[in-house]
Amino acid sequence: MRSVNICDLAILLIEPSGTQLKVIMQHLHQEGVVNIEGVSCGNDALASLRSHQPDLIVSSLYLPDMTAIELLEEIKHDETLSHIPFMLISSESSFKILDAIRQAGVVAILPKPFEARDLKNALRATIEFIDPQQIDLEYYDVENVRVLVVDDSKLARKHICRVLNNMGIVLITEAVDGKQGAEVFAASEHEFDLIITDLNMPVMDGEGLIRFIRQDLNNAIVPILMVTSENNETRLSKVQKSGVSAICDKPFDPQTVKEMLFRVLE
């Protein structure tokens, strides 16, 4: 049974528009959240974070003194703050801009305006992140599951590793791109029970890594989970055909990842 509920969450809300701040607060109140601090800029948010830490940061993309991407980068590089989940609320539709914040590791990106169900799902994902339930596997001792995480973003790798740690998975090896991932896996092929990889990486992308494992090494056994922000259906279709076990969107819901891990490992 969980020890944290949505109504228990303490939230730092960063929104430069006074009107939008009140609207978002009203939505949060309707979901049962009452402990909300509102600020209007990034520097005020950082000052607040240094005095007391919330369970969740909710921010607009464009702030008077910085963007949410710059704010998140600063938070993620501060060891005392990097564990705090971050949710973005934005009307931005540019893939390039949103991808930067996806790669940094956010629990959710909500459109502006958002539906009540979107907010509820995002809050549930936050609960899963801060109060996880260990994955229960029939055929594995979860603490002995060995995972190779391949992503060119250090922040993304850190976020994925934290989610895995929260599920009880601690034996994790990291690689910075598909080429290094291929070399690490080829050198110790039978030491890994699972690969989690990004798609878009330099030197060798995730599709190339999958084809190397499935075709060059002729390994059809090891499960491969791809976590990606790619939205090109043609490219994703090619990845499906290359032999990936499952594909998950960035940002991902930890519960979704847990269900996928349960399916591919069992």
Image (cartoon, rainbow, N blue to C red):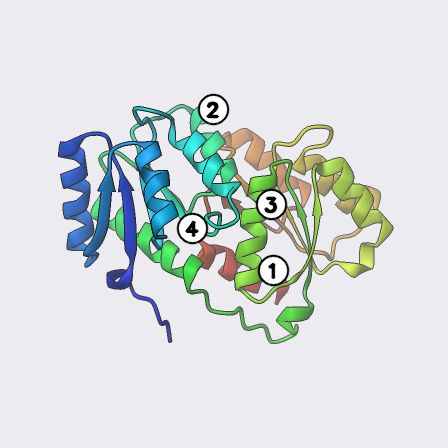
Q: Quadrant of residue 167?
A: bottom right
Q: Amino acid at mark 3?
A: Arg
Report which residue position mark 4 lands on.
84
Work out whether residue 195 or residue 15 is closer to the camera in this orientation and state it: 15
Q: Counting other residues with Cα less than 10 Å from the Cα at mark 1, is it few (<14), some (14-19), or many (20 or more)?
A: some
Q: Is residue 230 above or below residue 94?
A: below
Residue drawn at x 19%, y 30% as measured from the top left: 17
Which residue position is annotated with label 1? 264
| Of pointers 3 and 1, the one earlier in the residue sequence | 3
The CA distance from mark 3 to mark 1 is 20 Å
Measure the alpha-carbon separation of dots 1 and 2.
Answer: 31 Å
> Looking at numbered disc 4 in the image, what kind of residue is underneath it?
Ile
Disc 3/disc 4 C-alpha distance (Å): 16 Å
Instruction: Give the percent coordinates (x, y) of residue 148.
Output: 70, 52
Q: Nearer the viewer, residue 71 or 219?
A: 71
Contact, mark 1 vs mark 4 (Cβ under 8 Å): no
Q: Circle 4: is it few (<14), some (14-19), or many (20+) Cα within 10 Å?
A: many
Q: Amino acid at mark 1?
A: Val
Check if mark 3's residue and mark 4's residue have beta carbons within 8 Å: no
Say which of marks 3 and 2 sits in front.
Answer: 3
Dot 2, crowdedness within 10 Å: few (<14), some or many (≥20)? few
Does 227 sit left or right of 144 as displayed?
left
Q: Which mark is residue 157?
A: 3
**Which secondary structure, mark 2?**
helix
Residue pictured at 15% horizontal, 54% vertical: 30
Say which of marks 1 and 4 sits in front: 4
